[in-house]
Image (tube, helix red, strand yellow):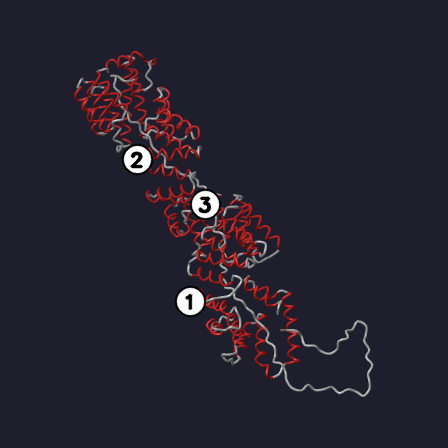
Amino acid sequence: MERLIPVFNQSFQDNNPALLHSPQYRRDLLDLKKRYETYHRQLYTSADSLQFVNNEAVIQALSGDFTKSYRLMESLNLGTDENRFRYHRGLIRLLTKHYPAARLDFQDNKESKYATLNTLVAYGREGRTSDGLTYAATTPHGATAGKWNYNTALLYKALGQPEEAVNELAAAIRQKDELIAYRLQRGDLLMKLGKDKKAVDDFEKVARRHPKAQIRYAFALLSLERFAAARYVFDQYLETGDRAFRGDAYLGIGHALYGLRQLSEAQRYYRIAATFRKGDPVALCGQGNVLLTKRDYRAAKVLFDRILRDYPTYLPAYLGRAVAYYGQQKYPETLADFSKAERLLDENKHSLADVFVCKGYAEYYLKKTSAAQADFQRAIRLDAGRYEALAGMSGILIDQKKYPEAGQYLAKALNYEKNYDRMWSNYGNLQLHFDMYKKAYESFRRARLLNPANIKAQNGWGVVLLESDQLDRSLSLFDSLVQANPTIPYLLNNRGIVQAYHGNRHEQRQQYQEASSRYEAAFNDFKAGMAAAPARRFYNVNQGNVYRYWEKYDDARMSYQAYQDKSAINNTAVMYAGQERIKDAKYYLGVALQIDSTHRVFQFNMNLLVKDKHKELARAVASARDDGPFSDIGIKYSRDGFVTIYLYDYEYDTLQFPGRHYLPLPVEEYGEDYFIPEYDFQLLPYEAKKGPTPKKKRGTYKQQKITMPGRSRRVGTQCPDLF
C-alpha cells in the first residue's frame, strides 16, 4: 500500500490516468493482491465480513475498477458509528461522481484529516461553486500540501475571479512546489490575464518534469514572440518520443516559423500538424494565414471558406477571410467578416496592426470616414511606424481640408516608407497648398524618379518648374502632358497659367504680338478646363486675369465674382489699382487682409498701394529682365508692380497599399481544470481471534532434523505484513 497510494494520488494530481497502467504499478498491485489473498485465506472468519468487503472495494478502486468498488461498498449496511468504513465509502463515491452522498460520508468524520479537503473537492466537481467557496471560507483545515488552496483557486476561476485564483495558487506553491498542477494552473491563468512573462516563468520551472508542461512553456514563449526559443523547446519535446502532444508540437513549430517569416517551412509544418489534429481547424487556418502573408488571396479565401463550412463558429477563419476579401478589393464583404470576428480585434495586441489597417482602408473606400479614422488611430497606437495607417490618416484629413495635420501624418509616413511615389506626390501637393515651392520641388522630383508615369507627380513638377522661373521647361512639360491627356482639367488649367506668365514676359520685352498669342492660348486652356470640370469654379479667377490683361474689366470682374475667395478679392483690388481706383483697391485689399492677415501677397500689395510704389516697381522689374533680383515670379513678371494670384490645380491620389499581412493565431490554451482530492485508502485488519489453541501431538521418539544447504531454518507459513 505504501507504494500504491502515492502513485494512485499522483494520477489525480497530474491528471494522468495512465500512471495506473504503468508496469511498476501493476506489479505492485498484483503483489498486494497475492499477499492479501494469503492473509485472507489464513485469518478470515465470518466476523470479518465488513473488513473483507471494504478491502476488496479498496483493491478494486486501486485497480481502476471504480464501478465494481462502488457496488461492493454500497452493499454494506453501515451504521453512523462506523466512521472508517463510511470514510472509505465516501472516497469511492467521490471516485464514481456520487458527490452529495460522498459529502454525507465525510461530514463530521474524524477518521481522516482529509475529510474536509475531499468535501471541498466534492463541491467543486459537482459544480456547486458558490457553496464550495463558502465552505472553504468557513471550514478549518489542516495541512494539505497546498491542495486546499489549489481547489479553492479553481472555484474562484469558475466564478470569473482570476486574480483571487492566482493568489490562492501562490499560497499552494509556497506549501508544496513539487506538484506541477499548481504552476501549470497559475501559468494558464496568467496567460489569460495577459501576464505572459510571469506565465513563462511558471511553465519553465516545471517544463522538464512533464511533457504537457514542456508544451505549455513553448506556447507561452510564442506569445512573447520568442519564436526561435519556442521552436527549440518544441524540437526538444519531439526528441523525447512522447506522442501525446506531437500534433501540438508540430502546430507550435508552424507558428514559430510563421513568426520568423519562414513561410514555406511554416506551411509544411502546418500541413503535418493537420494530419495529427483531425477535426481541428487551427492548422488549416495557419496555412490560410501563410497564404495571406504571401498575398495569395484567392487560395487563402478558398481555404477559409472550407474551414468555415466545417467550423462555422471559428472566429480566426473569419478574420483571415476578411483580409482575403480586402486583398480582392471586396470591401463590403471585408467589413462583414471583420464584424463577425470582432471579439478577436484586441486594441492592445501589437500583431493586429495590419488588421486594423485593412479594416480602416475598407471603411475609407466605402466613405465610412469616422470608422476608418478610429481604426487608423488604433493601428498607429499599436505600431507607431505603421506607415499605411499614417498615410490613411493624411488622406482623411486632406478630404476634411485639414491640410496642416495631413502634412504632419504624411511626413511621418515618409520617414518609414520612401519608395511609394503617390505618397511623395501627395506630400508635394500639400507643400504647394502652403506655397512651399522649393520643398515641393524635391517631393515631386522623388515621385517622378520612382514612377515617371505618375501624372499627378508630373503635374506638380511642372508647377514647381514654373515657380522656380523655368518657364520654358514647364511649358514643354505641360504641352507633352496635355497632348497625351487632353481631357484632364488640372493639366489644362496649369498650362494656361504657364501660358499667361509667358505672355507677361513677352509684354515686358515689348513683344506684344507674342504676348497676345500667349494670352489667347491661356484663355483657351482655362476655357477647356472649365468645360471639362464645371465644378472647379476657381478656374474663373485665372480666366479673369486674362480678361484684365486684355482690359476687359467687366468680364474680369464677373469672372472674379464667380469665385469670390480671397485670391479673387486680391486680384479685383489689383485690377482697380491699375485703373487708378485707389480707394476701391484699398477697400478690397482690406477685405482680403481681414480674411487672412498673414498672407504675404496681400501685405505686399497693400504696402505698395499705400506707398504708391507700384509704378516704380513695375518699371524696375521690366528693365531688369532675367538678371533682376526678384526670384518670385509673381513680382518678376508683374505688369503693374502688384502681384496677381493664379490658382494652381492638383489632385491627391487615393493611396493603396499591398498590405503587410501577419495574422498569428492565438496560442493553444489548455483547460485542465481538475480538482485534486486525497485518497488515503487503507486495508483494514481482521479481528484478533480468541479461544484455546489446539496442541500438536508429539511422537514418543525424537526425530532427527536435517537442514539442507541454502534453506532457511525457519519453517511453517507466516502471515504477510499488510497493515
Q: Residue furthest top?
A: 623
Which quarter of the picture shows residue 264? top right
Task: Identify the amino acid type marked 2.
Answer: Lys
Q: Residue shown at 21%/16% (left/top)? A: 612
- Residue 409, given in percent of the width and then of the height, sits at 37, 35
Q: Point out the image quarter for the N terminus.
A: bottom right
User: Could you tell me if the residues under marks 3 and 2 are in contact, i.e. CB atoms within 8 Å?
Assistant: no
Tell me the crowding category of disc 1: few under 14, some 14 to 19, or many 20 or more residues within 10 angstroms, Cα based: some
Helix, strand or loop at label 1? It is helix
Which quarter of the picture shows residue 494? top left
Task: Identify the amino acid type marked 1.
Answer: Asp
Q: Which residue in the structure is indicated by mark 2?
A: 401
Q: Is residue 32 left or right of residue 644?
A: right
- Residue 533, given in percent of the width and then of the height, sits at 28, 32
Q: Which residue in the structure is indicated by mark 1?
A: 131
- Choose the circle earlier in sequence order: 1 or 2: 1
- Residue 326, given in percent of the width and then of the height, sits at 41, 45
Q: Point out the image quarter for the C terminus.
A: bottom right
Residue 242, numbered label: none
517 and 327: which is toward the camera: 327
Q: Is residue 324 visible?
A: no
Tell me the crowding category of disc 3: few under 14, some 14 to 19, or many 20 or more residues within 10 angstroms, Cα based: some
Q: Which residue in the structure is indicated by mark 3?
A: 351
Which quarter of the picture shows residue 361? top left
